[in-house]
Amino acid sequence: MTIQNPEPNPPQGFWVHYADEEDVTSHLFCGEHHDASAVCPNCNKPLLLFLELDASDQRLGIPARSYVRVPLYYCWTCDLSQALFAYKLNPQGSIQILKFRSGSQQKDFPYPDYPHWFPGAQVCLIALSHEEQAAVGVLNSSACIEQILQIEEQTPELARPRHQVGGEPLLLQGWPDHICPSCGKQAPLLASIGNDCLDSRGLAGYDFVQVLFTFCRECDVVMASNACD
Ligand SMILES: [Zn+2]
Ligand SMILES: [Zn+2]
């Protein structure tokens, strides 16, 4: 029996764009955080914050809860990145880590002097057009190679992982296998985080890498794993 992948939630995809001065936004990309509960259990340093979504943005369809932000955390510098990472969002905004690969820190990985946090910025969520979403779907499928080559040539920006919330992102290694540790169900995709950031070294130091986040809305559990090409 094959497990049916749940539809991404929200089904509409959004690019994550840096906000202009006139944009009204409440979503934050990277930056330093001071959540004492969000500490890597292997590295004993703050978890890396990629994105902090404002849960009240109705386009995201996040059920009303006592938490107001959905932070996307990860750690690249230890064995946590080798397996599924899962945490629960607590009512007061803190998190509780439910699952991680324990192990050692990786020296000079992903690159030497890897920072504890990256420069923060306000970001907007810009809806993908139907054409863009369709093109990403073709890239993810085993559709005819000419069609894929045409997309790669005409819109190369679609052919490498970008930051995306909702919808079906470019999937370097297919759908992630994220079973919620609380309910045992496959969770729908929430976001894909690529390499681009305000530090020229990048979030991972390599463009063809992504961290995929799923979100079990019944259990308030966020899960993350990476894929690369
Ligand atoms: Zn770590
Ligand atoms: Zn669940």
Image (cartoon, grey):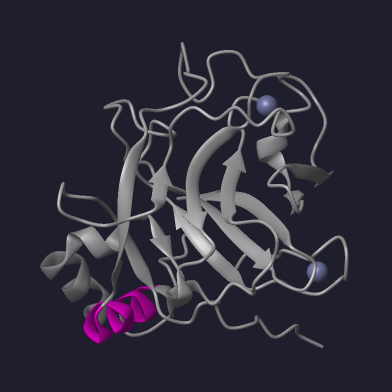
Q: Can residue 86 be seen from the camera position used here?
A: yes
- The correct choice, above or below, for 59 with respect to 47 in the image is below
- The correct choice, above or below, for 212 with respect to 12 in the image is above
Left or right of 104 in this view: 153: left
The picture quadrant for ligand 1 comes to: top right
Q: Can residue 167 be seen from the camera position used here?
A: no
Q: Residue at x 50, y 61 (%)?
A: 191
Location of the N terminus (image quadrant):
bottom right
Indicate yes or no whether the magenta region holds residue 134.
yes
Residue 228: x, y in percent?
49, 48
Q: How many marks?
A: 0
Q: Residue at x 25, y 77 (%)?
A: 132
Q: Nearer the viewer, residue 114 or 40?
A: 40
- The correct choice, above or below, for 151 with respect to 28 in the image is below
Residue 103: x, y in percent?
80, 26
Residue 160: x, y in percent?
32, 56
Q: Residue at x 83, y 31 (%)?
A: 102
Residue 7: x, y in percent?
58, 83
Indicate yes or no whether the magenta region holds residue 125.
no
Left or right of 210 in this view: 123: left
Q: Quadrant of residue 105?
A: top right
Q: Nearer the viewer, residue 96 or 210?
A: 96
Q: Nearer the viewer, residue 203 or 173?
A: 203
- The correct choice, above or below, for 94 with respect to 222 in the image is above
Q: Quadrant of residue 55?
A: bottom right
Left or right of 5 in this view: 101: right
The stretch of residues the image draws in magenta is 129-139
Prevailing secondary structure of the magenta residues:
helix
Left or right of 137 in this view: 150: left
Q: Residue at x 80, y 44 (%)?
A: 96
